[in-house]
Image: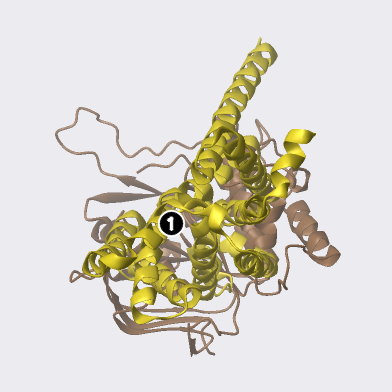
Amino acid sequence: MQWFVEPFQYEFFRTGLSVAILAGALCGLLGVYIVLRGMSYIGHGLSHAIFGGAVVSYVMQWNFYLGAGLWGFLTAVLINQTVRRTRIGADAAIGVITTASFAVGVALISRYRRFTQSFDAALFGNILGVTWDEVAVVGGIALLVALVILLFYKQLLFTTFDAEVAQVYGVRTQWVDTLFALALAAAIIASMQVLGVTLIAAALVIPAITARLLTDSFGRMMAYAIAIGVTCGALGMYLSFYVDVASGATIVLLQAAAFAVAMTVSGLRHQAGRRLAHVHVD
Amino acid sequence: MQPLVEMRNVTFGYDATPTLRDVSLHLHRGQFAALVGPSGAGKTSLLKLVLGVLQPTHGAVLLNGAPIDGRQTARIGYVPQLETVDWNFPVTVEQVVLMGRARQAGWGPWHGAAAQREARAVLARLEIDHLAGRHIRALSGGQQQRVFLARALIAQPDLLVLDEPTSGVDLRTAENILHLLAELNRQGMTILMTTHDLNAAAAHAPWIICLNRAVIAEGAPEDIFTDAILSRTYGSEMIVVRQAGMLLVAQKPHPHTHRDILPTPVLGHPNRATGDSEAIDAGAPGAVNPGAVNEEPAYAVVR
């Protein structure tokens, strides 16, 4: 038990573990919708776009959470509208809009070189520098997003399954999409401290796609994705503490390992199913 | 009497070339209309205009006399083409059916006991209540079609819109679906469907709308299914055979092909159908007793 308790004597570990668990749960939850909508790339794109927003907030001396959040939200809405109103596919829209937004950030950094170091943390994560105030903000965002998902569960499910048909049946899909964009922007900002812009996409996609391999039930997929996100977040913190590797990277590598295990289990299950079908036919 | 659906001089296009030109149509309550025409004729676009998913470039689409803007009083049930459904999406039959109650659905992930009873009742009506807990991929084509029909019916629609309800299913299943639609229509449901199956449309739909970017003709099958109208609609020579009270449509073979078959339409027997057909009771609508004369003829599709 010593190995389990020892890291807790350090404040940075306690705050880091808390925020890793919260971000793991948050990314797992939202990742389900992202994966099922076939928009896996949006996490990657939006995190880069939000980085641009973070730099703009700094230059304009706005509150980081508000400035970067608003920037990310507007980017997500712009992507949705571009896809809805033009013939441009989601992947192309994400590619154009988010990289342009990221480029704004890079351009501003090159102009005001004095704050490059703090933005290194945004790019690669700085979980060990998280304060309890920041844990509280991430906790608040996680609670709010979970509440939104819970309240609009049925509308989100239908919109994710088939947005066009959902509209016919009376679901205000535009509102649902806008709400989801807001939740996603908030989740990315919350996770930026843990994983950094470069690894957020993985944390959004891997737990959800791993869960999808394990179940055909939407509810269970959501529960598994959250469990994988939380477990990998906590284990990743411990592992990074003992082997002295960057926490964000450790968390993502653990998630990738979970995905590999799920792939193997799912493959074996299919093979067994096929063999059983042959036996029945014979 | 005010029509349930009214299209007033509707023109629509995805780009400069209009997909639909100056379409004016009325669909009254209790009507059952089949929209026929070649691929690219604008059938699905027309349905989507009625559903409010697309907006006309010119003209107006009215539902119950009011523009379609999401606040209309009339309810629409929509059964999309099976090809457009994501069959890998992790949902069960019951979850899909309950999506049809989106207007009445409250907050939170749970459906009340009344909603669940309603879903079971609709599934039972379509004889698929035993499949409620199954994943949608683990169903035959006919069962999948019924699931989406159940989702439409639980919405208690004033208008039922179906896009190619018989595509991708075998003859017997197609017959069952069309019988079911006819039955719903007899109970007062207004139905608008698209189909490529002209013979089935002739047998089951009391009203035919021929479309090829514009309305070519509309009326009862016996008036509409003529060589001239169908040839104009499809842009190739079509022949209509009237035999034993049935209307059978065939495309005239190309003169350079070696097949010297005349449009002898094959009278299909549902029992010969292969594929994923479901077992049906002999007394059920659409059932055929081998050796007995079936009152409702079944046709092979001759395209």
Image vertical order of residue B171 relative to residue B285, above or below: above
Percent x, y for residue A216?
Answer: 65, 41
Q: Which residue is at a point 59% across and 28% down the rendered structure image?
A: A261
Percent x, y for residue A172?
Answer: 55, 75
User: Who is closer to the viewer here, A223 or A232?
Assistant: A232
Figure chain in brown? B
User: Who is closer to the viewer here, B299 or B142?
Assistant: B142
Q: Quadrant of residue B289?
A: top right
Report helix, strand or loop for mark 1: helix
Q: Which residue is at a point 19% across and 39% down the rendered structure image?
A: B254
User: Who is closer to the viewer here, B192 or A181?
Assistant: A181
Asked whether residue A225 appears in the rendered view, the answer is yes
- Outermost residue, right side: B113
Asked whether residue B247 appears in the rendered view, the answer is no
Q: Which residue is at a point 65% across and 21% down the rendered structure image?
A: A273
Q: Which residue is mark 1?
A: A121
Figure chain in yellow? A
Q: Amino acid at mark 1?
A: Ala
Percent x, y for residue A92?
Answer: 29, 56
